[in-house]
Amino acid sequence: MITLGIETSCDETAASICKDGKILSNIVSRQLVHTEFGGVVPEIASREHESLLNTIVHAALYESKIELIELDAISVTQGPGLAGTLLTGISFAKGLGIGLGIPVIPVNHLEGHIFANFLANESLKFPFVCLLVSGGHTQLWSVEGMERYMLLGETRDDAAGEAFDKGARIFCLEYPGGPEIERAAIGGDSNKIDFPRSLLSKNSLEFSFSGLKTSLLYFMDDFQETESIKLKDVIASYQKAIIDTLVEKVKRALRITGYDRCVIAGGVAANKCLRHQLGVVLPTKEIIFPELSFCTDNAAMISYLGELKIKLGKCESLDFSANPNLRLI
Ligand code: KG4
Ligand code: ZN
């Protein structure tokens, strides 16, 4: 079976070909046009998808040496995301699907992030805890199987990715902030500044990052680099405060559920400090990350999950639309 996946939930225009569970191509074009605005401008993002989609889909077909007529199905991100950008992908997918006479299946972007872990870890087994950390979400899930999810906790305010993005803006770094902060923190002393970790009550699996961001804002108000405190020390300390919180909550979630396995999903899963720290704090647990190219938004996770769903007979009619607030359950 050959499935084309299309992802346009935010500012990545992406297409991928999946053949019987194997990714043959994964083309992602990140829209650099938003950099000067310090964040994604929805209207511009939709227009960019509109003009890029045809080229990106053809690039995915070309790289995988698959002809359009060989496609058996199309899967497309339904949500969550920006309404306009989701609609460009869905309209494109439906048009192509009708033209080719093949099914088009809507896929939940968050579920796609979770299943990206199966791409590099074919032997991954349920159940597991999933830490889902992206630009819009920070959630802990108990995952017992496909579509068998139980929410353990989520953020009360900012998402972890948002904490990176907003922090980067305060440090005058570019968007998206995660990779920028990770780079700028290299060589810095992460123990120099004791930024607050909002761990809430003892067994809480909820998150809160807005206090940390405010504390950084006040700190930077009158910060001057000195011999003993460099900017990279502040950046490394800020990153560590986010990571420490995530690691502590994963530790709690594993203790509470009794599971030995945790899967990390979403853009922040690309962070090397998070990867390292989870290994240090939880050496006896199985901690699984997607390949770097499958952490941030991509269509491989959409084509892969779409194919799984079609094989399970979950194909719907074309009577679906974008759902910007789609949840996992
Ligand atoms: O999953 P994703 O690509 O898009 C959403 O679904 O939101 O996640 C994007 C988020 C951004 O906030 C970005 O700053 C963060 O993931 N991110 C990172 C890293 N790479 C991307 N955060 C920390 N370290 C990274 N290396
Ligand atoms: Zn995402």
Image (tube, helix red, strand yellow):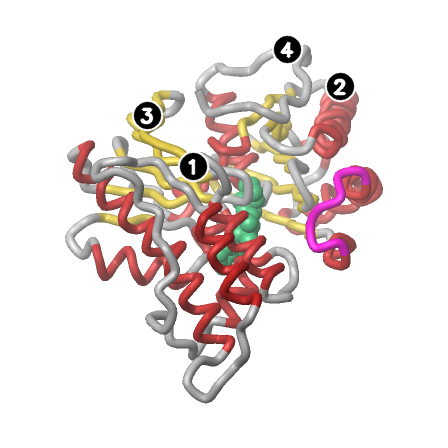
Name the element at disc 2.
helix
Tell me the number on the disc at residue 98: 2
Quadrant of ligand 2: it is: top right
Q: Which mark is nearer the camera, 3 or 4?
A: 3
Image quarter where the N terminus lies is: top right
The kind of residue on which mark 2 rests is: Ile
Q: Is residue 15 magenta?
A: no
Label 2 beta carbon within 8 A of ligand 2? no
Label 3 beta carbon within 8 A of ligand 2? no
Q: Which mark is nearer the camera, 1 or 2?
A: 1
Q: Residue drawn at (60%, 22%), measured in percent from left and top? A: 105
The kind of residue on which mark 4 rests is: Ser
Q: Which residue is mark 3?
A: 145
Q: CA distance from mark 3 to mark 1?
A: 23 Å
* Marked residue nearer the N-terminal end (4 or 1): 1
Task: Classify residue 257 by image quadrant.
Answer: top left
Q: CA distance from mark 4 to mark 2?
A: 11 Å
Relative image position of residue 228 (x, y in whole percent): 41, 85
Task: Classify residue 238 by image quadrant.
Answer: bottom left
Relative image position of residue 203 (x, y in whole percent): 22, 36
Q: How many marks?
A: 4
Q: Which residue is mark 1?
A: 155
* Marked residue nearer the N-terminal end (3 or 1): 3
Mark 4 burial class by Cα count in 10 Å: few <14, some 14-19, many 20+? few
Relative image position of residue 75 (x, y in whole percent): 61, 28
Q: Which residue is mark 4?
A: 317
| Range drawn in magenta | 37-43
Q: Is residue 40 magenta?
A: yes
Q: Which mark is nearer the camera, 4 or 1?
A: 1
